[in-house]
Amino acid sequence: MKIKFLIAGLFCVASASKVSAQKYLLTEAKEKFDKYLMLSKVQATYAEADKNLVESRTAIDKVAVHEKTAQLPLTFALKAAMYSTYAMRDTLESKTLPLYTTAAEALAKAKELDAAGENKALISEATRNLAQYQLNKGVTAFQAKSFDAAFKAFDAYHQISPNDTTAIYYSGLAAIAGKNVPAAIKSYTELLPLDFSKKETIYLDLSSLYFFDMKDTVNALKTVTAGIEKFPSSGELRKREIEISLQSGKAQEVLGKIEAAIANDPKNKNLYYYAGLVYTTFGNNSSVELDKLKETAGKNLKESLLPAFLAKFNPVQTKKQEYMTKAADMYKKALELDPAYYEANLNLGYALLSPAIDSYNYANNYLPPAKQKEYNAMLAKSTAQSDLAKPYLVKATELQPKNIDAWRNLKNYYLTTRNMAEANKVQKTIDGLK
């Protein structure tokens, strides 16, 4: 009996020794991995770092298959950190993907078992590595214009780091590039409640996705309105609100909002500019209506049919000029607050020149040779109106001498006043900027 008890005791001691040895090996694996992390930060100790990494992997591979240590939270956490590190050390996917897969599986198990958070640092290290792996994969795919593959990688990055705004933003960019509009909307919508530096752009881009791609004016307007509430000084968001409102039949509503804002903040130059944009858009819409009339009823027009045509044409022309006058008034108020406001100068010049061009075209298209006196009077009216626009057109080219739009508007002034020499000079400047 005593011999049997002695033998049983020896077995227990041997078994306990094996468990102790495995736990010691696990501790050693962690210590060597910690050394690797520290030594890998300095170039002079890279070789020593790699040595510790290899030794740590050898140890963790043994621990991970031993029945007494295989299911420990530390084993999974260290294995995840270890294999994710190796996955980052090569660029060939046939080599890195198995390492990544092993690390991802170990990380999921580590998170499940580590309820006490004792292995938080290792879990964070593995998470960062796996996220970086997918980020690198996504960037490579995006640069190769493989946008679907890029989206999948960035989305995987997002799943690993749910609150990482870079992951969400890149997922949206890849989805847009790959014309996956629903996915892009989902990604950008997720960014809105988060702290993200480019949120103003996100509101604008999201409104574009709804408006241009989905033809959803309701959500487009809802998005841009929310954006303006967050960024009231954003010119691009204001312009988009005007654009969407016009398309959805709510132009007067947005104009009313701008006018109310002016009443509350009469020293805000941008609000007058936005109001001017609305009236300019109304005027441009009238131009479209006039072009349709010219195309349908005014083409190859006989003199006998001219009165009937002008009876339709003139009221629309008058309405357009009224809108441009109101636009000019708003731009002038913006310039009273800031004479160097480029956009206001540019658009005021346009609003003043537009009626002059209309008068010039009217004289040449709809006044017969028998009405020479009226023709001369109309051209004189056109020139006088053009001269009102000139100071603002010139100012715009001075404020932004490399802006082609400014020079094109100035060229139109010279064409309207029949000064071909100056028009040709401006054209050379435009050619030099292209």
Image (spheres, rainbow, N blue to C red):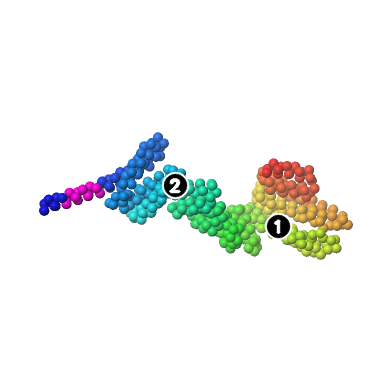
- Residue 102 falls left or right of residue 387: left
Q: Amino acid at mark 2?
A: Ser
Please tell me which residue is depicted at 79% across the width and 48% down the height of the picture.
417
- Name, please, the residue furthest toward the left: 1
Q: Is residue 15 magenta?
A: yes
Q: Nearer the viewer, residue 104 or 307?
A: 104
* Any part of residue 277 in sight: yes
| Mark positioned earlier in the residue sequence (2 or 1) | 2
Q: Is residue 286 above or below residue 35?
A: below
> Element under label 2?
helix
Disc tally is: 2
Q: Nearer the viewer, residue 377 or 185?
A: 185
Q: Give percent across and percent down for residue 66.
A: 29, 50
Q: Is residue 346 above or below residue 308?
A: above
Q: Is residue 389 magenta?
A: no
- Name, please, the residue furthest toward the top: 44
Q: Which mark is residue 284?
A: 1
Q: Give percent across and percent down for residue 26.
A: 30, 46
Q: Which residue is mark 2?
A: 94
- The Cα atoms of the two marked residues, 2 and 1, are separated by 59 Å
Q: Give percent across and percent down for residue 253.
A: 63, 63
Please tell me which residue is depicted at 45% across the width and 44% down the height of the picture.
92
Please tell me which residue is depicted at 60% across the width and 61% down the height of the picture.
215
